[in-house]
Image (spheres, grey):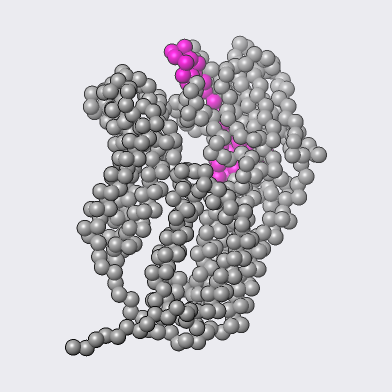
Protein backbone atom coordinates (compact mmCIF):
# COMPACT_ATOMS: atom_id res chain seq x y z
CA UNK A 1 0.00 0.00 0.00
CA UNK A 2 1.63 3.19 -1.15
CA UNK A 3 1.03 6.61 0.23
CA UNK A 4 0.75 9.55 -2.12
CA UNK A 5 2.81 12.41 -0.80
CA UNK A 6 1.44 15.84 -1.58
CA UNK A 7 3.86 18.63 -2.23
CA UNK A 8 3.62 21.26 0.52
CA UNK A 9 1.92 24.47 -0.50
CA UNK A 10 4.39 27.31 -0.61
CA UNK A 11 3.35 30.65 0.72
CA UNK A 12 5.67 32.47 -1.66
CA UNK A 13 4.45 33.57 -5.09
CA UNK A 14 5.98 31.39 -7.84
CA UNK A 15 8.87 33.07 -9.59
CA UNK A 16 7.18 33.20 -12.99
CA UNK A 17 4.24 35.08 -11.42
CA UNK A 18 6.08 37.81 -9.52
CA UNK A 19 6.65 40.39 -12.23
CA UNK A 20 3.32 39.79 -14.06
CA UNK A 21 1.37 40.18 -10.82
CA UNK A 22 3.25 43.39 -10.00
CA UNK A 23 2.54 44.71 -13.50
CA UNK A 24 -1.15 43.79 -13.24
CA UNK A 25 -1.43 45.52 -9.88
CA UNK A 26 0.17 48.68 -11.27
CA UNK A 27 -2.14 48.62 -14.29
CA UNK A 28 -5.25 48.22 -12.11
CA UNK A 29 -4.08 51.03 -9.80
CA UNK A 30 -3.49 53.30 -12.78
CA UNK A 31 -6.87 52.40 -14.25
CA UNK A 32 -8.56 53.06 -10.92
CA UNK A 33 -6.91 56.49 -10.63
CA UNK A 34 -7.69 57.52 -14.22
CA UNK A 35 -11.35 56.51 -13.93
CA UNK A 36 -11.82 57.21 -10.23
CA UNK A 37 -14.88 59.40 -10.86
CA UNK A 38 -16.65 56.61 -12.73
CA UNK A 39 -15.81 54.02 -10.07
CA UNK A 40 -16.92 56.40 -7.30
CA UNK A 41 -20.25 57.06 -9.04
CA UNK A 42 -20.78 53.30 -9.28
CA UNK A 43 -20.22 52.81 -5.55
CA UNK A 44 -22.53 55.72 -4.73
CA UNK A 45 -25.31 54.04 -6.69
CA UNK A 46 -24.74 50.80 -4.76
CA UNK A 47 -25.02 52.80 -1.56
CA UNK A 48 -28.24 54.65 -2.29
CA UNK A 49 -30.14 52.05 -4.34
CA UNK A 50 -31.54 48.89 -2.78
CA UNK A 51 -31.75 47.40 -6.28
CA UNK A 52 -27.95 47.32 -6.57
CA UNK A 53 -26.85 46.92 -2.96
CA UNK A 54 -25.78 43.34 -3.82
CA UNK A 55 -22.89 44.77 -5.87
CA UNK A 56 -20.87 45.39 -2.69
CA UNK A 57 -20.25 41.64 -2.39
CA UNK A 58 -19.39 41.08 -6.07
CA UNK A 59 -15.66 42.05 -5.97
CA UNK A 60 -14.97 39.96 -2.82
CA UNK A 61 -16.77 36.97 -4.35
CA UNK A 62 -14.79 37.34 -7.59
CA UNK A 63 -11.51 37.47 -5.65
CA UNK A 64 -12.54 34.41 -3.62
CA UNK A 65 -13.35 32.50 -6.81
CA UNK A 66 -9.90 33.33 -8.18
CA UNK A 67 -8.28 32.39 -4.86
CA UNK A 68 -9.90 28.95 -5.10
CA UNK A 69 -7.91 28.44 -8.31
CA UNK A 70 -4.58 29.62 -6.90
CA UNK A 71 -2.91 26.17 -6.93
CA UNK A 72 -3.95 25.59 -10.53
CA UNK A 73 -2.83 29.08 -11.55
CA UNK A 74 0.55 28.49 -9.92
CA UNK A 75 1.17 25.73 -12.46
CA UNK A 76 0.56 28.08 -15.39
CA UNK A 77 2.91 30.47 -17.16
CA UNK A 78 1.69 34.07 -17.56
CA UNK A 79 2.31 35.41 -21.06
CA UNK A 80 1.54 39.07 -21.78
CA UNK A 81 -0.49 39.62 -24.95
CA UNK A 82 -0.32 42.96 -26.74
CA UNK A 83 -3.32 42.09 -28.91
CA UNK A 84 -5.61 43.03 -26.01
CA UNK A 85 -4.42 46.64 -26.21
CA UNK A 86 -6.74 47.07 -29.22
CA UNK A 87 -10.00 46.28 -27.37
CA UNK A 88 -8.72 48.38 -24.45
CA UNK A 89 -8.46 51.34 -26.83
CA UNK A 90 -11.99 50.66 -28.11
CA UNK A 91 -13.31 50.57 -24.54
CA UNK A 92 -11.56 53.87 -23.84
CA UNK A 93 -13.37 55.42 -26.80
CA UNK A 94 -16.65 53.95 -25.53
CA UNK A 95 -16.01 55.52 -22.13
CA UNK A 96 -15.32 58.89 -23.76
CA UNK A 97 -18.58 58.77 -25.71
CA UNK A 98 -20.43 57.79 -22.53
CA UNK A 99 -18.94 60.78 -20.73
CA UNK A 100 -19.89 63.12 -23.56
CA UNK A 101 -23.55 62.17 -23.13
CA UNK A 102 -23.38 61.71 -19.32
CA UNK A 103 -24.56 58.09 -19.38
CA UNK A 104 -23.52 56.24 -16.23
CA UNK A 105 -24.37 52.79 -17.52
CA UNK A 106 -22.03 53.19 -20.52
CA UNK A 107 -19.05 54.65 -18.66
CA UNK A 108 -19.31 52.14 -15.82
CA UNK A 109 -19.68 49.20 -18.20
CA UNK A 110 -16.60 50.35 -20.14
CA UNK A 111 -14.48 50.69 -16.98
CA UNK A 112 -15.42 47.25 -15.65
CA UNK A 113 -14.66 45.78 -19.09
CA UNK A 114 -11.24 47.50 -18.96
CA UNK A 115 -10.55 45.88 -15.59
CA UNK A 116 -11.48 42.48 -17.01
CA UNK A 117 -9.36 42.92 -20.18
CA UNK A 118 -6.36 44.08 -18.15
CA UNK A 119 -5.96 40.46 -17.00
CA UNK A 120 -5.44 38.79 -20.41
CA UNK A 121 -3.34 41.78 -21.53
CA UNK A 122 -0.83 41.22 -18.73
CA UNK A 123 -1.25 37.53 -17.86
CA UNK A 124 -2.32 36.11 -21.23
CA UNK A 125 -5.45 34.55 -22.62
CA UNK A 126 -4.76 31.07 -21.17
CA UNK A 127 -4.66 32.37 -17.60
CA UNK A 128 -7.65 34.65 -18.19
CA UNK A 129 -9.59 31.75 -19.70
CA UNK A 130 -8.99 29.69 -16.56
CA UNK A 131 -10.61 32.40 -14.42
CA UNK A 132 -13.11 33.57 -17.04
CA UNK A 133 -16.12 33.19 -14.76
CA UNK A 134 -14.74 35.26 -11.85
CA UNK A 135 -13.76 37.96 -14.33
CA UNK A 136 -17.17 37.90 -16.00
CA UNK A 137 -18.84 37.91 -12.58
CA UNK A 138 -17.42 41.42 -12.07
CA UNK A 139 -19.99 42.77 -14.53
CA UNK A 140 -22.60 42.35 -11.80
CA UNK A 141 -20.90 45.41 -10.28
CA UNK A 142 -22.42 47.59 -13.00
CA UNK A 143 -25.73 49.04 -11.74
CA UNK A 144 -27.72 48.41 -14.87
CA UNK A 145 -31.11 46.83 -15.41
CA UNK A 146 -33.64 49.48 -14.41
CA UNK A 147 -34.41 50.02 -18.10
CA UNK A 148 -36.47 46.81 -17.80
CA UNK A 149 -38.74 48.37 -15.17
CA UNK A 150 -41.52 49.70 -17.46
CA UNK A 151 -41.78 46.35 -19.27
CA UNK A 152 -41.83 44.41 -15.97
CA UNK A 153 -44.45 46.75 -14.51
CA UNK A 154 -46.65 46.28 -17.57
CA UNK A 155 -46.35 42.48 -17.44
CA UNK A 156 -47.09 42.47 -13.71
CA UNK A 157 -50.24 44.52 -14.27
CA UNK A 158 -51.29 42.24 -17.16
CA UNK A 159 -50.95 39.07 -15.08
CA UNK A 160 -52.58 40.55 -11.98
CA UNK A 161 -55.64 41.75 -13.89
CA UNK A 162 -55.90 38.45 -15.77
CA UNK A 163 -55.63 36.41 -12.56
CA UNK A 164 -58.19 38.56 -10.74
CA UNK A 165 -60.68 38.16 -13.56
CA UNK A 166 -60.00 34.41 -13.67
CA UNK A 167 -60.96 34.18 -9.98
CA UNK A 168 -64.21 36.04 -10.53
CA UNK A 169 -63.19 39.52 -9.35
CA UNK A 170 -64.29 42.27 -11.77
CA UNK A 171 -61.50 44.68 -12.74
CA UNK A 172 -61.48 48.02 -14.53
CA UNK A 173 -58.00 48.93 -15.79
CA UNK A 174 -56.40 52.05 -17.24
CA UNK A 175 -52.68 51.85 -17.80
CA UNK A 176 -51.03 50.68 -14.59
CA UNK A 177 -54.04 51.67 -12.49
CA UNK A 178 -56.91 49.26 -11.86
CA UNK A 179 -60.04 49.21 -9.75
CA UNK A 180 -61.71 46.25 -8.05
CA UNK A 181 -64.84 46.35 -5.86
CA UNK A 182 -62.79 46.67 -2.66
CA UNK A 183 -60.55 49.52 -3.79
CA UNK A 184 -58.00 51.03 -6.15
CA UNK A 185 -54.57 49.56 -6.90
CA UNK A 186 -51.62 50.60 -9.02
CA UNK A 187 -48.38 49.00 -10.14
CA UNK A 188 -45.41 51.19 -9.14
CA UNK A 189 -41.64 50.73 -9.40
CA UNK A 190 -41.48 48.59 -6.26
CA UNK A 191 -43.96 46.18 -7.88
CA UNK A 192 -41.88 45.67 -11.02
CA UNK A 193 -39.80 42.87 -9.52
CA UNK A 194 -36.57 44.20 -11.03
CA UNK A 195 -34.83 43.82 -7.66
CA UNK A 196 -35.85 40.18 -7.43
CA UNK A 197 -34.75 39.56 -11.02
CA UNK A 198 -31.28 41.11 -10.69
CA UNK A 199 -30.60 39.46 -7.32
CA UNK A 200 -31.80 36.08 -8.58
CA UNK A 201 -29.69 36.33 -11.74
CA UNK A 202 -26.52 37.11 -9.78
CA UNK A 203 -26.99 34.40 -7.15
CA UNK A 204 -28.30 31.88 -9.66
CA UNK A 205 -25.30 32.40 -11.95
CA UNK A 206 -22.92 31.88 -9.04
CA UNK A 207 -24.80 28.76 -7.92
CA UNK A 208 -24.70 27.28 -11.43
CA UNK A 209 -20.93 27.86 -11.71
CA UNK A 210 -20.17 26.27 -8.33
CA UNK A 211 -22.49 23.27 -8.69
CA UNK A 212 -22.38 22.25 -12.34
CA UNK A 213 -19.66 21.37 -14.82
CA UNK A 214 -21.95 20.90 -17.81
CA UNK A 215 -22.53 24.13 -19.72
CA UNK A 216 -26.00 22.90 -20.58
CA UNK A 217 -26.96 22.52 -16.92
CA UNK A 218 -25.47 25.92 -16.12
CA UNK A 219 -27.43 27.71 -18.84
CA UNK A 220 -30.65 25.90 -17.94
CA UNK A 221 -30.30 26.93 -14.30
CA UNK A 222 -29.51 30.54 -15.26
CA UNK A 223 -32.62 30.52 -17.46
CA UNK A 224 -34.67 29.32 -14.50
CA UNK A 225 -33.08 32.02 -12.32
CA UNK A 226 -34.33 34.61 -14.82
CA UNK A 227 -37.83 33.24 -15.42
CA UNK A 228 -38.69 32.18 -11.87
CA UNK A 229 -38.45 35.62 -10.17
CA UNK A 230 -40.58 37.16 -12.92
CA UNK A 231 -43.34 34.58 -12.47
CA UNK A 232 -42.93 34.72 -8.69
CA UNK A 233 -43.37 38.49 -8.76
CA UNK A 234 -46.57 38.09 -10.79
CA UNK A 235 -47.91 35.64 -8.21
CA UNK A 236 -46.76 37.92 -5.38
CA UNK A 237 -48.59 40.93 -6.84
CA UNK A 238 -51.76 38.91 -7.43
CA UNK A 239 -51.56 37.42 -3.94
CA UNK A 240 -51.17 40.84 -2.31
CA UNK A 241 -54.18 42.29 -4.15
CA UNK A 242 -56.22 39.18 -3.36
CA UNK A 243 -55.19 39.29 0.30
CA UNK A 244 -56.13 42.95 0.52
CA UNK A 245 -59.46 42.25 -1.17
CA UNK A 246 -60.57 39.36 1.07
CA UNK A 247 -59.36 41.11 4.24
CA UNK A 248 -61.24 44.32 3.51
CA UNK A 249 -57.96 46.15 2.90
CA UNK A 250 -56.65 45.48 6.40
CA UNK A 251 -53.74 43.28 5.26
CA UNK A 252 -50.99 43.79 2.66
CA UNK A 253 -51.87 47.43 1.98
CA UNK A 254 -48.90 49.20 3.60
CA UNK A 255 -45.26 48.43 4.20
CA UNK A 256 -46.29 44.92 5.17
CA UNK A 257 -46.99 44.08 1.54
CA UNK A 258 -43.30 44.73 0.74
CA UNK A 259 -42.32 42.47 3.65
CA UNK A 260 -44.65 39.75 2.38
CA UNK A 261 -43.04 40.14 -1.03
CA UNK A 262 -39.48 39.59 0.21
CA UNK A 263 -40.53 36.65 2.38
CA UNK A 264 -42.28 35.07 -0.60
CA UNK A 265 -39.26 35.73 -2.82
CA UNK A 266 -36.93 34.19 -0.22
CA UNK A 267 -39.03 31.03 -0.06
CA UNK A 268 -39.08 30.75 -3.87
CA UNK A 269 -35.30 31.20 -4.12
CA UNK A 270 -34.66 28.64 -1.39
CA UNK A 271 -36.83 26.12 -3.21
CA UNK A 272 -34.99 26.83 -6.48
CA UNK A 273 -31.59 26.16 -4.91
CA UNK A 274 -32.76 23.02 -3.08
CA UNK A 275 -34.14 21.59 -6.32
CA UNK A 276 -31.07 22.67 -8.30
CA UNK A 277 -28.74 21.01 -5.80
CA UNK A 278 -30.21 17.61 -6.67
CA UNK A 279 -28.41 17.73 -10.03
CA UNK A 280 -25.10 19.12 -8.76
CA UNK A 281 -21.90 17.64 -10.21
CA UNK A 282 -18.52 17.04 -8.56
CA UNK A 283 -15.79 19.48 -9.50
CA UNK A 284 -13.48 18.32 -12.28
CA UNK A 285 -9.90 17.87 -11.17
CA UNK A 286 -7.50 20.22 -12.94
CA UNK A 287 -4.78 18.51 -14.92
CA UNK A 288 -1.94 20.75 -15.93
CA UNK A 289 1.78 20.78 -16.20
CA UNK A 290 3.98 22.81 -13.96
CA UNK A 291 5.33 25.85 -15.73
CA UNK A 292 9.00 26.55 -15.84
CA UNK A 293 9.96 28.73 -12.87
CA UNK A 294 11.34 31.49 -15.02
CA UNK A 295 10.00 35.02 -15.36
CA UNK A 296 8.77 36.22 -18.78
CA UNK A 297 10.80 38.75 -20.73
CA UNK A 298 10.81 41.76 -18.41
CA UNK A 299 11.25 44.31 -21.16
CA UNK A 300 8.21 43.12 -23.09
CA UNK A 301 6.06 43.06 -19.95
CA UNK A 302 6.89 46.58 -18.75
CA UNK A 303 6.68 48.03 -22.25
CA UNK A 304 3.18 46.56 -22.55
CA UNK A 305 2.25 48.06 -19.17
CA UNK A 306 3.45 51.49 -20.30
CA UNK A 307 1.49 51.21 -23.57
CA UNK A 308 -1.67 50.12 -21.73
CA UNK A 309 -1.48 53.08 -19.31
CA UNK A 310 -0.95 55.47 -22.22
CA UNK A 311 -3.95 54.05 -24.09
CA UNK A 312 -6.12 54.36 -20.98
CA UNK A 313 -4.97 57.95 -20.40
CA UNK A 314 -5.88 59.12 -23.92
CA UNK A 315 -9.68 59.29 -23.38
CA UNK A 316 -9.15 61.32 -20.20
CA UNK A 317 -6.91 63.72 -22.11
CA UNK A 318 -9.39 63.87 -24.97
CA UNK A 319 -12.28 64.69 -22.62
CA UNK A 320 -10.35 67.62 -21.12
CA UNK A 321 -9.68 69.09 -24.58
CA UNK A 322 -13.09 68.57 -26.15
CA UNK A 323 -16.03 70.95 -26.01
CA UNK A 324 -14.78 74.49 -25.56
CA UNK A 325 -18.30 75.80 -26.05
CA UNK A 326 -18.73 78.90 -23.89
CA UNK A 327 -22.50 79.16 -23.64
CA UNK A 328 -23.81 80.72 -20.46
CA UNK A 329 -24.60 78.23 -17.72
CA UNK A 330 -27.60 80.27 -16.61
CA UNK A 331 -29.82 81.49 -19.42
CA UNK A 332 -33.16 83.04 -20.08
CA UNK A 333 -35.77 81.07 -21.98
CA UNK A 334 -38.70 83.16 -23.12
CA UNK A 335 -42.10 81.85 -24.09
CA UNK A 336 -42.32 82.29 -27.87
CA UNK A 337 -44.67 84.83 -29.38
CA UNK A 338 -46.96 83.09 -31.86
CA UNK A 339 -48.52 84.82 -34.85
CA UNK A 340 -52.07 83.46 -34.76
CA UNK A 341 -52.22 82.10 -31.21
CA UNK A 342 -52.75 84.45 -28.28
CA UNK A 343 -50.98 84.00 -24.95
CA UNK A 344 -53.46 82.99 -22.25
CA UNK A 345 -52.67 83.92 -18.65
CA UNK A 346 -54.99 81.28 -17.18
CA UNK A 347 -53.42 77.86 -16.47
CA UNK A 348 -54.74 75.01 -18.57
CA UNK A 349 -54.41 72.48 -15.72
CA UNK A 350 -52.41 71.84 -12.55
CA UNK A 351 -50.39 69.17 -14.37
CA UNK A 352 -46.95 69.80 -15.87
CA UNK A 353 -44.07 67.51 -16.93
CA UNK A 354 -41.37 66.71 -14.38
CA UNK A 355 -37.77 67.61 -15.36
CA UNK A 356 -34.88 67.76 -12.91
CA UNK A 357 -32.40 70.63 -12.85
CA UNK A 358 -32.84 72.15 -16.32
CA UNK A 359 -30.82 75.23 -17.19
CA UNK A 360 -34.15 76.92 -17.90
CA UNK A 361 -37.78 75.96 -18.39
CA UNK A 362 -40.91 77.71 -19.56
CA UNK A 363 -44.61 76.89 -19.31
CA UNK A 364 -47.14 78.83 -21.36
CA UNK A 365 -50.75 78.48 -22.51
CA UNK A 366 -52.00 79.64 -25.90
CA UNK A 367 -55.56 80.03 -27.24
CA UNK A 368 -57.18 80.21 -30.68
CA UNK A 369 -60.84 79.98 -31.65
CA UNK A 370 -61.79 78.82 -28.17
CA UNK A 371 -59.20 76.02 -28.14
CA UNK A 372 -56.37 76.07 -25.62
CA UNK A 373 -52.95 74.37 -25.79
CA UNK A 374 -50.20 74.18 -23.19
CA UNK A 375 -46.50 74.38 -24.14
CA UNK A 376 -43.72 73.23 -21.81
CA UNK A 377 -40.02 73.69 -22.64
CA UNK A 378 -37.23 72.20 -20.52
CA UNK A 379 -33.82 73.43 -21.74
CA UNK A 380 -30.50 71.78 -20.83
CA UNK A 381 -26.92 73.00 -21.28
CA UNK A 382 -23.55 71.88 -19.87
CA UNK A 383 -25.17 68.59 -19.03
CA UNK A 384 -23.76 66.33 -16.35
CA UNK A 385 -24.91 63.46 -14.19
CA UNK A 386 -27.00 65.77 -12.00
CA UNK A 387 -28.53 67.73 -14.89
CA UNK A 388 -29.26 66.01 -18.19
CA UNK A 389 -32.10 65.72 -20.65
CA UNK A 390 -32.31 61.91 -20.80
CA UNK A 391 -32.86 60.87 -17.23
CA UNK A 392 -35.14 58.24 -15.73
CA UNK A 393 -36.42 60.94 -13.35
CA UNK A 394 -37.55 63.18 -16.23
CA UNK A 395 -41.09 61.96 -16.84
CA UNK A 396 -44.53 63.21 -17.73
CA UNK A 397 -46.05 61.67 -14.59
CA UNK A 398 -44.28 60.10 -11.63
CA UNK A 399 -45.54 56.63 -10.78
CA UNK A 400 -46.33 57.65 -7.19
CA UNK A 401 -48.17 60.82 -8.21
CA UNK A 402 -51.43 61.06 -6.23
CA UNK A 403 -53.12 63.49 -8.62
CA UNK A 404 -52.27 62.20 -12.12
CA UNK A 405 -51.65 58.88 -13.87
CA UNK A 406 -50.45 57.82 -17.31
CA UNK A 407 -53.19 55.89 -19.09
CA UNK A 408 -51.74 54.98 -22.48
CA UNK A 409 -48.72 55.64 -24.69
CA UNK A 410 -48.44 55.71 -28.46
CA UNK A 411 -46.35 57.06 -31.32
CA UNK A 412 -47.71 59.88 -33.48
CA UNK A 413 -46.41 61.13 -36.83
CA UNK A 414 -46.47 64.95 -36.78
CA UNK A 415 -45.95 67.28 -39.72
CA UNK A 416 -43.66 70.12 -38.59
CA UNK A 417 -43.92 71.95 -41.89
CA UNK A 418 -40.45 72.87 -43.12
CA UNK A 419 -38.89 70.50 -40.53
CA UNK A 420 -40.67 67.53 -42.11
CA UNK A 421 -42.63 64.69 -40.51
CA UNK A 422 -41.29 63.49 -37.14
CA UNK A 423 -42.46 60.66 -34.88
CA UNK A 424 -43.31 61.95 -31.41
CA UNK A 425 -44.56 60.32 -28.23
CA UNK A 426 -48.26 60.57 -27.47
CA UNK A 427 -49.44 60.05 -23.90
CA UNK A 428 -52.91 60.10 -22.41
CA UNK A 429 -53.00 61.38 -18.83
CA UNK A 430 -55.88 61.09 -16.39
CA UNK A 431 -56.59 63.04 -13.23
CA UNK A 432 -57.23 60.95 -10.11
CA UNK A 433 -59.65 63.31 -8.36
CA UNK A 434 -62.74 61.36 -9.42
CA UNK A 435 -65.11 61.13 -12.34
CA UNK A 436 -64.86 64.87 -13.01
CA UNK A 437 -61.05 64.80 -13.17
CA UNK A 438 -59.68 66.11 -16.48
CA UNK A 439 -58.03 63.98 -19.12
CA UNK A 440 -55.13 65.26 -21.17
CA UNK A 441 -53.36 64.33 -24.38
CA UNK A 442 -49.66 65.25 -24.50
CA UNK A 443 -47.19 65.06 -27.38
CA UNK A 444 -43.51 65.10 -26.45
CA UNK A 445 -40.25 65.14 -28.41
CA UNK A 446 -36.67 66.40 -28.12
CA UNK A 447 -34.73 69.18 -29.82
CA UNK A 448 -30.94 68.75 -29.93
CA UNK A 449 -29.11 71.65 -31.60
CA UNK A 450 -31.66 71.75 -34.40
CA UNK A 451 -32.37 67.99 -34.65
CA UNK A 452 -35.86 66.69 -33.80
CA UNK A 453 -36.42 63.19 -32.43
CA UNK A 454 -38.38 61.25 -29.84
CA UNK A 455 -35.67 58.58 -29.46
CA UNK A 456 -33.53 58.62 -26.31
CA UNK A 457 -30.73 56.89 -28.23
CA UNK A 458 -30.72 59.48 -31.00
CA UNK A 459 -30.60 62.25 -28.42
CA UNK A 460 -27.41 60.68 -27.08
CA UNK A 461 -25.91 60.33 -30.55
CA UNK A 462 -26.76 63.90 -31.58
CA UNK A 463 -25.37 65.22 -28.29
CA UNK A 464 -22.12 63.29 -28.67
CA UNK A 465 -21.65 64.51 -32.27
CA UNK A 466 -22.36 68.09 -31.25
CA UNK A 467 -19.83 68.00 -28.41
CA UNK A 468 -17.20 66.33 -30.59
CA UNK A 469 -17.63 69.25 -33.03
CA UNK A 470 -17.23 71.77 -30.21
CA UNK A 471 -20.83 73.01 -30.52
CA UNK A 472 -21.96 72.27 -26.97
CA UNK A 473 -24.76 70.03 -25.77
CA UNK A 474 -27.75 72.37 -25.90
CA UNK A 475 -30.99 70.40 -26.03
CA UNK A 476 -34.57 70.63 -24.87
CA UNK A 477 -37.68 68.59 -24.22
CA UNK A 478 -40.77 70.03 -25.90
CA UNK A 479 -44.24 69.04 -24.65
CA UNK A 480 -47.56 70.27 -25.99
CA UNK A 481 -50.83 69.22 -24.41
CA UNK A 482 -54.53 69.93 -24.30
CA UNK A 483 -57.65 68.72 -22.52
CA UNK A 484 -58.86 65.41 -23.94
CA UNK A 485 -62.48 65.54 -22.77
CA UNK A 486 -65.41 63.57 -24.14
CA UNK A 487 -66.42 66.60 -26.21
CA UNK A 488 -62.87 67.32 -27.35
CA UNK A 489 -61.57 63.74 -27.61
CA UNK A 490 -61.70 63.50 -31.40
CA UNK A 491 -60.17 66.95 -31.78
CA UNK A 492 -57.31 66.82 -29.27
CA UNK A 493 -54.71 65.20 -31.52
CA UNK A 494 -55.53 67.25 -34.66
CA UNK A 495 -55.43 70.39 -32.49
CA UNK A 496 -51.95 69.60 -31.19
CA UNK A 497 -50.74 68.70 -34.67
CA UNK A 498 -52.09 71.97 -36.02
CA UNK A 499 -50.43 73.89 -33.20
CA UNK A 500 -47.01 72.38 -33.94
CA UNK A 501 -47.32 72.74 -37.70
CA UNK A 502 -48.21 76.42 -37.45
CA UNK A 503 -45.93 77.43 -34.61
CA UNK A 504 -42.83 75.25 -34.70
CA UNK A 505 -40.67 77.89 -36.48
CA UNK A 506 -41.39 80.39 -33.70
CA UNK A 507 -40.78 77.78 -30.96
CA UNK A 508 -37.46 76.77 -32.54
CA UNK A 509 -36.44 80.41 -32.84
CA UNK A 510 -36.93 80.78 -29.08
CA UNK A 511 -34.75 77.70 -28.49
CA UNK A 512 -32.06 78.95 -30.89
CA UNK A 513 -32.05 82.33 -29.15
CA UNK A 514 -31.29 80.59 -25.87
CA UNK A 515 -28.60 78.49 -27.51
CA UNK A 516 -26.72 81.54 -28.77
CA UNK A 517 -26.73 83.35 -25.43
CA UNK A 518 -23.22 83.98 -24.14
CA UNK A 519 -21.95 84.74 -20.63
Q: Position of residue 497 (x, y in %)?
A: 57, 25
Task: Say whether residue 16 is left or right of residue 464.
Answer: left
The verdict on residue 2 being magenta is: no
Of residue 471 and residue 386, the one placed in the foreground of this image is: 386
Question: Residue at position x 50%, y 64% from top?
Answer: 116
Q: Which residue corresponds to the image point at 46% horizontal and 47% vertical from the top-left?
A: 52
Q: Nearest the camera: 415 or 260?
A: 260
In the image as oriented, which residue stretches furthest toward the right? 519
Q: Is residue 455 magenta?
A: yes
Magenta region: which residues?
Answer: 430-459
Residue 428, compared with residue 79, is above or below; it is above
Q: Quadrant of the N terminus?
A: bottom left
Q: Residue at x 66, y 35 (%)?
A: 358
Report if residue 157 is visible in the image. Answer: no
- The quarter of the picture where residue 262 lies is top left
The image quarter containing residue 251 is top left
Q: Is residue 255 left or right of residue 37?
A: left
Amino acid sequence: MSQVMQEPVRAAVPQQWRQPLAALLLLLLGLGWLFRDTLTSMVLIWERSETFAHAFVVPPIALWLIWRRRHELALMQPKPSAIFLVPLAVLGLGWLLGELVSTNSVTQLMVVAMIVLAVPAVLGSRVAGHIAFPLGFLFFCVPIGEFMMPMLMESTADFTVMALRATGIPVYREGLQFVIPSGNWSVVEACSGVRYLIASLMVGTLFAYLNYNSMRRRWVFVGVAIALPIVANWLRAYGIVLLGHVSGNTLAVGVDHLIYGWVFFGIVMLAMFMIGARWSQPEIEFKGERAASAPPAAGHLWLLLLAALLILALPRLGLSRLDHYEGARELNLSAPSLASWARDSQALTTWSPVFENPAAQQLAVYAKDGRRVGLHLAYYRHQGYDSKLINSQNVLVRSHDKAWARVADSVKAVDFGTAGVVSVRGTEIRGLAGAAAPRLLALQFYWVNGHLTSSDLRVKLYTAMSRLQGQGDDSAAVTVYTVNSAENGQLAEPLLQQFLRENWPAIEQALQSSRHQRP
